[in-house]
Amino acid sequence: MLDRLIKIFTSLRLTIVLLSLGMILVFWGTLAQVTLGLYKAQNDFFRSFFVFWSPEGSDWQIPIFPGGYLIGGLLLINLLAAHTRYYRPSKKKIGIVFIHFGVVLLLVGQLLTDFLSVESTLHLREGETKNYSEASRSFELAVVDVTDRDLEKQVAISHRRLSKQDEIKHPELPFTLKATTFFANSELKQREEPGFQPVKGVKGIGEGVWMRELPHETMMDRRDVPTAVVEISGPEGSPQSYLASAHIARPQSFQYGDRTYEISMRPVRYYKPFSMHLLEFTHDRYPGTQIPKNFSSRVILNRPETGEKREVLIYMNNPLRYWGETYYQSSFDTDDQGSYLQVVRNPSWLTPYFSCVLVSIGLTIQFLMHLVPFLKRRLAT
Amino acid sequence: MEPPWRCLSTGLAAAVALSSLVMLSGCGRDEIKVYKVAKESPDAMAAAHAAHGRGQMPPGHPDISAATPKIQYALPSGWEERPASAMRSASFSIPGKDGQAADVSVIPLPTTGQEVELVNMWRAQMQLPSVGESEAANLAQAATIGGETGRLFEMASEGPILDDKLHGRMLVAVLTRGATSWFFKMAGEDSQVTEQKPAFVEFLKSVSFEAPTPATPATTASSATAAATGGSDGKPAWTVPEGWQEIPGGQFLVAKFVVTGEGNARAEINVSMSSGDGGGLVPNVNRWRAQLGLSQVPGAEISSSVKKVQAGGNELSYVELSGTDLNTGRPALVLGAMVPRPGQTWFYKIAGDRQLVEAERAKFTTFAETVRY
C-alpha cells in the first residue's frame, strides 16, 4: 500500500496530470472572472483547495474540481518526493538540481506572496501629507482619543473581530465595546423604505437612519460597505450606542470621563514611520487626444527619525521601493489634482527573480553539458 | 533505492510547513491595533475633503452620509435630483442639448480661509490661469443664499474643454456659516449654464439650512451653579444636596457630582438616562457589581435583593452593593436607584468610600426621590 502511494506521489504521470489540471483551472478561472469578478474568481479557483458548485436554490457546496492550493501543493509534494527518490549525487545532474530547486522556490514563493503580501492605497491631494496607506476592501472600527492637542491615540478593531459581536476590552480604552448589530455589507437610507430597518437607540448621526444588510459584493469595482451599531459601556453612566458605518465618512465624537473620543468605520490603515507629501501630480496626454501618455507624482518623503527628507518622482513603470514596500503610480483624481499610489508590501517579492535565475542556470548547464560533448564529437570527426 | 518513508516524509514535511505558514499568516488578522500618531493638520484635512472625482464609495453604490448637513430648497423646473453622497448635501443634473448635462452640487466643507486656492482650483478646471489673492476677491459678486449674503464666482473657459468641442462655464456660490463653508456649484456647457444662471440664483435664494444633528451634545460644560437648581439643559429639576459638587460627567451622563470626606475619602454620584428600559435591571446591576470586583449573579438573586420605593409618582428600585474599589483597593459601597419613566429609564448611583457613602445615604435617597421630571 505504502509502496503504491509512494509510486503515485513520485510519478511523472502525476506531474503531467497536475499540470494539465492546472492549465484547465487557469483557463476556467480566467473565463469565470467575467461573471464572478476578479476577486471572487481568484478566491474560488486559485485560493482554494476545491472549486465548488452549488445546485440552484440550495446551500450545498459540492466540490467538482481541484483548486489552486490543492494542485500547487500536490505539485510541490510530487516534485520534492520525486527528487528525493530519484536523485543521485552526480555532476551530470547538477543542472537538474538547479531547475528543480528553482521550480520549488517559485511554488513556495507564490504561496508566501499569497499569504504575506499586503496591498493598500495611498491617496494624496496636491499639498496633502499622509503617513499611512489604506486597504481597498477591508475596514476597521477606529476609536480615537483626540483629547490631546498634538497627539491622538487610535485603537483600531478589525471588522472581522467586530463581526463576532462579543465584548471587546482593551487596556487603552476605559470602556467596553460591543457590536450589537453587524452587517458585513450594508445600505443606509435617510428615510423609511421597504426592507430597511430603523437604527434604534443610537446617539449622534445614526438617529433617523434606516439600514439593511446586503449580500457580499463580488465584482471587482465594488466592495462590501460594513455597518455596525456599537455599544459603549463602562463605569461612567449607562451604555450608549453609535452607528458606525463605512457609508459615513466623518467620525462622530463623544465624551467619556474627561476625554474626547471619535468613533468611525474606516478602511484599514497601515501606518508608516515616514510621511509622503504630494507636491505635484502631472498627467500628460497624447496631443489632441484624451489618451494618457504619462502620469507622475512628485512627492517629498520625510522620515524624521533618520533625518531623511528627499524628493521622489513616481511614475508609470518607475515605482518607489522603500521600507520594504513598493509604491506604484496607479490612478488619479478626475480633476488631475490628486494621485493614487498602490502600496505593495511583499516580503517574498524577490523569490520569482531567484527562481528564474536558478532555472536559467540549470537549463544552461544542462544545455552546455549536451552541447559541449556534441561539439567535441563533431570536431573529432 | 532510497527508503520509501523518506520520499513521503519529505513531501509531508513540506506540506506541514506550508500549512503552518498558512495558519500563522491567518492569525493576527483578528487583532486590535493601537497607534499613537500626530494629529492631521487642518490644511491636510481640508485637502482631503476637497478630494472629488473618486470618493470613498465604490462606483455605483448608493451611498449616503447622515453626517452631511442638510438643506431645504425649491427645486427649479428642469432640474433632476440626484442622490446625496458622502460629500454632497444635494446633487442635481440639468439635461441639455446633444446629451450634455450641467451638474449642480451642494458641498459643505470645514472653513479653511484659503479661498484663493479654491478659486484657482475652479479656474484650473476651466483651464484659466491662476490669480492672486486680491484679484480672486475682486472676482466675487454678492449673492443671496438662504437670506444671507454670500459670494458668487463665475468662470468660463477661453477655449473648448468639453470633449475638445464645447466651451465650459462654472458658477460657484460660497457662503460661510461658522465653521462650515457651503459651496453651491453649477458646471457644464457654456450656453446651458448661462441659460440656467437665473434658475441657479433663484435656487440659492430658496435655500434654508437645517440645524445639523450635533455630533457631540454639549453636556460637559454645565457649571455647578446651573446644576444647583436643575431643570435646565434638558435636565430634570432637582435640588443638589449640600456638599455635592457638580463636575463634567461626559456625554454618557446627565450629571455627575463628587463628594469628599476625611482622609481623601471620595464618592461620585452619577445620573444617567437611557431610552427604553436601559438594558434592564439585571445587566445594569451586574455591570455595577463588576465595577466593585464582584462576580455576576443570576437575575433572580438580583431581583430578590431590590428594594422598591414609591416617591413622587415614580417607583424607584434601590440596589446596594458592597465590594472593593478596584483603583484604590479600599472598601467601597454602591447605592443605585433605577427609575422607569415613559419610554426611558433614569439611573442614579453613588459609589465610593464605604463610610462616606453610608454618611451620604440619606442625602442620596432624598435627592433621587425628589427629582421632578
Image: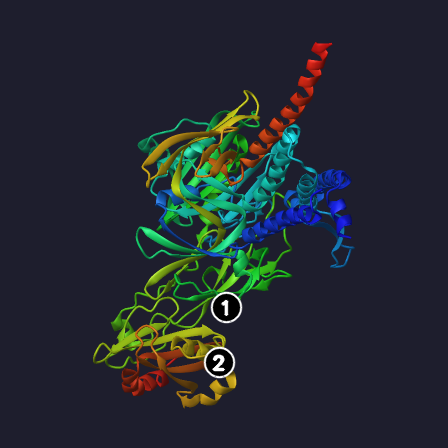
Q: In the depicted view, which residue is nearer to us: A210 or A231?
A: A231
Q: Where is residue A364, by image quadrant?
A: top right
Residue under label 2, please give it: B282
Distance between the alpha carbons at the discs numbered 2 and 1: 19 Å
Residue under label 1, please give it: A201
B213 relative to B245, above or below: above
Amino acid type assigned to the residue bearing label 1 in the image: Gly
A177 relative to B102, above or below: below
Residue B222, percent from left and from top: 30, 68
| Chain assignment, label 1 | A
- Neighbour tally class for label 2: few under 14, some 14-19, many 20 plus, Cα within 10 Å: some
- Neighbour tally class for label 1: few under 14, some 14-19, many 20 plus, Cα within 10 Å: some
| Chain assignment, label 2 | B
Amino acid type assigned to the residue bearing label 2 in the image: Val
In this picture, residue A118 sits left or right of residue A96: left
Residue B289, percent from left and from top: 42, 79
Q: Quadrant of the C terminus of chain A?
A: top right
B188 relative to B230, above or below: above
In this picture, residue A358 sits left or right of residue A34: left
Q: Secondary structure at mark 2?
A: helix
Badge 2 vs badge 1, beta-carbon distance below 8 Å: no
